[in-house]
Image (cartoon, rainbow, N blue to C red):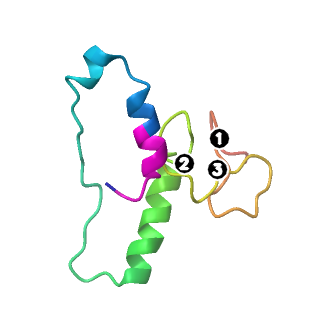
Amino acid sequence: MGSPDMNIVNADFEALPDHIRRDYTLRKEILWQSDIATEAELSAKEVEMICLYRSNDPEIGYNRWPKLPIVDRSEKCPPLYVDKPPA
């Protein structure tokens, strides 16, 4: 399931209404796999996927690293574009 912040996941779960917490399904989709990737390659791919799927955006996912860039372009994730990147 990647490396989400479990404190945030648990707090989110606790905030759900009782009827939803009693019938809760967690789904996992494998987006990439390799039998030969090094730990460094695996870590780089994880960051790439977190950024690609915006899993570090609190409105979407539970990852809090790498930080979601707002203005500072020195972060690890590239800036997000709503329509298309500037030409």
As helix, strand or loop, the secondary structure at mark 3 comes to loop
Amino acid carrying mark 3 in the image:
Leu
User: Farthest right residue?
Assistant: 71
Mark number for residue 81? 1
Q: Residues within 10 Å of mark 1 (few under 14, many from 20)?
A: few
Cβ atoms under marks 3 and 2 closer than 8 Å: yes
**Residue 55 in the image: x percent, y percent?**
48, 46
Give the camera-side residue of 23 and 75.
Answer: 23
Amino acid carrying mark 1 in the image:
Tyr
**Residue 37 in the image: x percent, y percent?**
31, 81
Amino acid carrying mark 2 in the image:
Asn
Q: Quadrant of the N terminus?
A: bottom left
Give the camera-side residue of 7 and 77.
Answer: 7
Which region shows up in magenta? Answer: 2-10
As helix, strand or loop, the secondary structure at mark 1 comes to loop
Cβ atoms under marks 1 and 2 closer than 8 Å: no
Whether residue 39 is situated above or below residue 19 in the rendered picture: below
**Residue 20 in the image: x percent, y percent?**
28, 19
Q: Quadrant of residue 82?
A: top right
| Residue lying at 30% horizontally and 17% vertically, measured from the top left | 18
Q: Quadrant of residue 72?
A: bottom right
Q: Report the number of discs.
A: 3
Mark closer to the observer (3, 1) = 3
Q: Is residue 67 left or right of residue 18?
A: right
What residue did someone put label 3 on? 68
Give the camera-side residue of 59 and 22.
Answer: 22
CA distance separating discs 1 and 2: 15 Å
What residue did someone put label 2 on? 56
Q: Residues within 10 Å of mark 2 (few under 14, many from 20)?
A: many
Q: Is residue 21 left or right of residue 52?
A: left
- Asked whether residue 16 appears in the rendered view, the answer is yes
